[in-house]
Image (cartoon, helix red, strand yellow):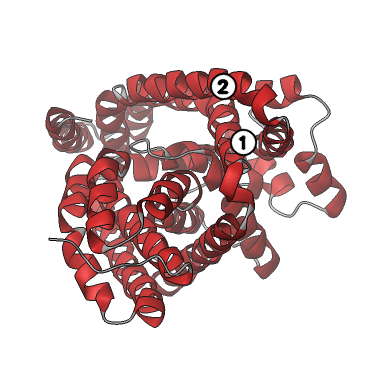
Amino acid sequence: MSRGFTIALVLALVLGVAVGYLCHVEVTDPATLARLAGYFGIVTDAFLRLIKMIIGPLVFSTLVVGIANMGAGSAVGRVGLRTVGWFLFASLLSLAIGIVMVLLLEPGRELALGIPQADAAAAVTLAQPGLREFVQSLVPRSIAEAMANNAILQIVVFSVFFGIGLAALGERGRGLTALIDQVAHVMLKVTGYVMWAAPPAVFAAVAATVTAEGLGILGTYGKFIGGYYFALVVLWLVLLGLGWLVIGARVRSLVAMIREPLLLAFSTASSEAAYPKTLEQLERFGVAPRIASFVLPLGYSFNLDGSMMYCTFATLFIAQAYGIELGGVQLVTLLLLLLVTSKGIAGVPRASLVVLAATLPHFGIPDAGLLLVLAVDQFLDMGRSATNVVGNSVASAVVAKWEGELGAPST
């Protein structure tokens, strides 16, 4: 996304605050305020539908291609196992840090929003699913049905089987893999188009919230953003600390060398935009080209540490805002669910919104809560995109060290 898009989001945010404040001050009748907020909600509802429209094909195409490529060649050998092992460990760590930090900071507790009436019964039903319901939600009867219902877990299960089967075909499957890869690129392009609807949706979301609640609601956004960036700092320290355990003091040099792609990812809110420069800097750092060219692209599908931590942080923030308590079993389920679903979407600005839209209903959290984070998602995406670069850079250096292919840095 361009700098102009970022400016458009900021202007939409400011304009939404101004319009919402005027409506809240000038209109004193609560019923009229509710109607005004409802009118704004038409725009945000349309945006939510667009987001849900792309979930199924986007998850299927990106996840199948990622698994098919991972299962080919050296990916099934020692390097592949070590890489995937690190990714899984880092993913669990990122998700767990997000859960712990949001539970400690409780940024959404002050909102105390009421659950929308239309979703109240569904929330009670879905909040504590039994084993039978969980299995039914996991295993698809039909991929067409799963796609039609946006049943993300079922789509993931089918995609995993499909990707493994496609990889097993070897050379015979190359053509189909290439075709699905083209579908994935089309869906990424469609996702980009959908995101251009974000500025009016941001305006409408903020205007509706401020119209109904007043300016006092904005104080919580400050706490949410501050808490999230504090959690990112903790995650950076943990990832770099783990990197130091493997590559030693050279981790400081690694941070210095990836400074440019870090800034690029942060300013564009897209870790994908920083990919070429990250690959170049890793090779200059001393990571063997065959390691960097394998670990880094795989990491863009399976090791988005910042995005994964955001998913747990934002999910529980929204749950806190609606006063929904998730127990220990549900938190573990959330962690495992996001561990899988976050692997299907990568490298797209604000793609975490897609994961959130698919995750919230599984825990009885109203999907309208997505609007609570939509207004400030641009600022959050900048931080998580930069974190994705850090996580994948550390992973590349660690795997290269394990393989004995971490050489001296080049000038």
In depth, the one of 114 and 249 nearer the eye is 249
Question: Label 2 crowding class (10 Å Cα cut-off): few <14, some 14-19, many 20+?
Answer: some
Residue beneath the point at 59% across and 25% down:
177
**Residue 69 figure quarter:** top right
- Asked whether residue 360 is in view, the answer is no
In depth, the one of 316 and 244 nearer the eye is 244
Q: Say which of marks 2 and 1 sits in front.
A: 1
Residue beneath the point at 17% across and 35% down:
6
Q: Say whether residue 56 is left or right of residue 90.
A: right
Query: Could you say where residue 274 lies in the image, as x and y percent from the top left?
Result: 25, 44
Question: Label 1 crowding class (10 Å Cα cut-off): few <14, some 14-19, many 20+?
Answer: many
**Residue 140 figure quarter:** top right
Q: Which residue type carries mark 1?
A: Ala
- Residue that mark 1 sits on: 68
In depth, the one of 207 and 102 nearer the eye is 102
Query: Could you say where residue 320 lies in the image, as x and y percent from the top left?
Result: 48, 59
Query: Could you say where residue 8 lies in the image, as x and y percent from the top left?
Result: 15, 29
**Residue 387 versus residue 237 in the image, above or below:** above
In depth, the one of 263 and 251 nearer the eye is 251
State if disc 1 and disc 2 touch (CB < 8 Å).
Answer: yes
* Element at label 1: helix
- Residue that mark 2 sits on: 180
- Asked whether residue 55 is in view, the answer is yes
Label 2 vs label 1: CA separation?
Answer: 10 Å
* Element at label 2: helix
Residue 273: mark in rendering:
none
